Amino acid sequence: MVHVLSDSTCDLSDELIKKYNITIIPLYVRLGDDEYKDGVNIIPDELYKWSDEHGETPKTAAPSVADIESYLEKDSEDEYIIFTISSSMSACFNNCRLAADDLDMSERVFPIDSANLSTGIGLQILRAAELALEGKKAAEIVCEIESLKDKVRASFVIDTLTYLYRGGRCSGVAALVGSALKLHPRIAVENGAMHPEKKYRGNSSKYVMDYVKDMEEPLKSSRRDRVFITHSGCNPEIVDRVRAYLESLDHFDEILETRAGAVVSSHCGPGTLGVLFIEG
């Protein structure tokens, strides 16, 4: 049997996790001296409140090698595929490799560096889960996912630069912070790292739709199976407008909406929205 696991930065909904039989390994979120598990005992709204009160960005940490080992059964013959956030952003991937080595399970445990984040990972996971349900072996699944990674298109537009700036995870953001005009940059993931692309202005309804419509041609030529709308707490009316626009393209079999978890939200801040898909 092939088990599909992921760290909690994949931002998949409970419904999808259950449907595809995915196991989630939580990262840690630290608010001062208090430590929480992403998706277990903290929600993004709580960390936004803490961050605003303290003027700090929450700290995040990868699951330990021992944490990961607890999800692996050494005495079984099962295979494990473990997806992680980009290795340039976290120690998750390396800790998975160390766990497999420590348990002498390297032939049955396959860590995958997604080179991505949020549902940019989720798109890879769902494909892997589909292949596992078809009875594919882990090595076959890993081979297909590795060929798929460069085709994942992950980007998002942010409401406030504060969280990305404090976190220091996105190169180029510091240059935008001093602007007198309120900017809403499009942040893209490329080669496992985040960087700002186009900049938008205006109210949230306008800049979000401008961002989505700028992707119309890539969306129309993308894989049809699914597209994600992932956000960190946006006005439901704006999310509905994005969904309606994607529906109007008459292209996707499935339009999935998910809410970013505490780790991703702690770096992008509230009001962030992304549309994520796989290039055709």
Image (cartoon, rainbow, N blue to C red):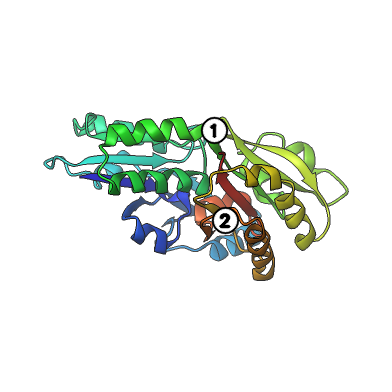
Among numbered discs 2 and 1, the one appearing first in the sequence:
1
Residue 136 spot, x, y in % from top left: 27, 40
Residue 149 spot, x, y in % from top left: 48, 34
Q: Which of 195 and 1 is in front in this view?
A: 1
- Residue 53 appears anywhere in the view: yes
Residue 277 spot, x, y in % from top left: 56, 46
Residue sitting at x 20%, y 32%? 105
Residue 257 spot, x, y in % from top left: 54, 61
Q: Which amino acid does label 2 sit on?
A: Thr
Residue sitting at x 53%, y 49%? 224
Q: Nearer the viewer, residue 108 or 104?
A: 108
133 displayed left or right of 197: left
Any mark on residue 257, and which? Answer: none
Quarter holding the N terminus is top left
Q: In which quarter of the image is residue 84?
A: top left
Residue sitting at x 47%, y 46%? 123
Residue that numbered label 1 is attached to: 192
